[in-house]
Image (cartoon, rainbow, N blue to C red):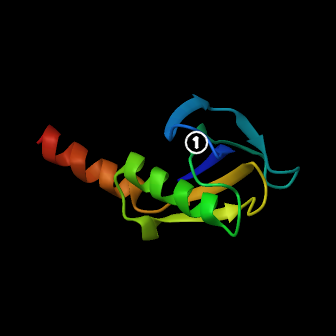
């Protein structure tokens, strides 16, 4: 699953909030996809990748996956980033299967 992230580095409090689920235009050939957008605040400054690492930790904790399952796809130096959360859909289905039957 890929998500869009709006970053606030150097914040007083860390947190994550789902903002919306817009249609993301991938160009004429690829069409549009839905991608959830999250606002993530971290205490670390945007220096030497420290904020990116903190965002990765925050997202992993939020989605209850290993840090290695969270990957920055684009926006290394931007406030708007795209992250990929691997194994999240699989984990969601396993939890559903355990609860549902």
Instruction: Examine the rendered structure and indicate whether residue 9 appears above or below residue 83.
Output: above
Picture coordinates of residue 59, whole percent (x, y): 48, 51
Q: In the structure shown, which secondary structural element does the residue marked by tag 1 occupy?
A: strand
**Foreground: 23 or 39?**
39
Q: Residues within 10 Å of mark 1 (few under 14, many from 20)?
A: many
The residue pinned by badge 1 equals 40
**Foreground: 7 or 97?**
7
Q: Quadrant of residue 88?
A: bottom left
Picture coordinates of residue 31, whole percent (x, y): 78, 47
Residue at point 32% right, 48% down? 92
**Foreground: 71 or 39?**
39
Residue at point 85% right, 55% down? 29
Q: Quadrant of residue 50?
A: bottom right
The C terminus sits in image quarter: top left
Picture coordinates of residue 83, whole percent (x, y): 60, 56
Q: Residue furthest top?
A: 20
Residue at point 30% right, 49% down? 93
């Amino acid at each position: 699953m890929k998500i869009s992230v709006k970053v606030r580095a150097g914040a007083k409090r860390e947190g994550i909030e789902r903002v919306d689920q817009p249609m993301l235009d991938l160009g004429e050939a690829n069409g549009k996809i839905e991608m959830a957008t999250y606002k993530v605040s971290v205490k670390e400054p945007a220096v030497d990748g420290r904020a990116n690492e903190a965002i990765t930790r925050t997202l992993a904790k939020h989605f209850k996956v290993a840090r290695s399952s969270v990957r920055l796809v684009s926006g290394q130096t931007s406030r708007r980033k795209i992250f990929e959360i691997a194994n999240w859909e699989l984990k969601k289905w396993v939890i559903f299967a355990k609860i549902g039957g």
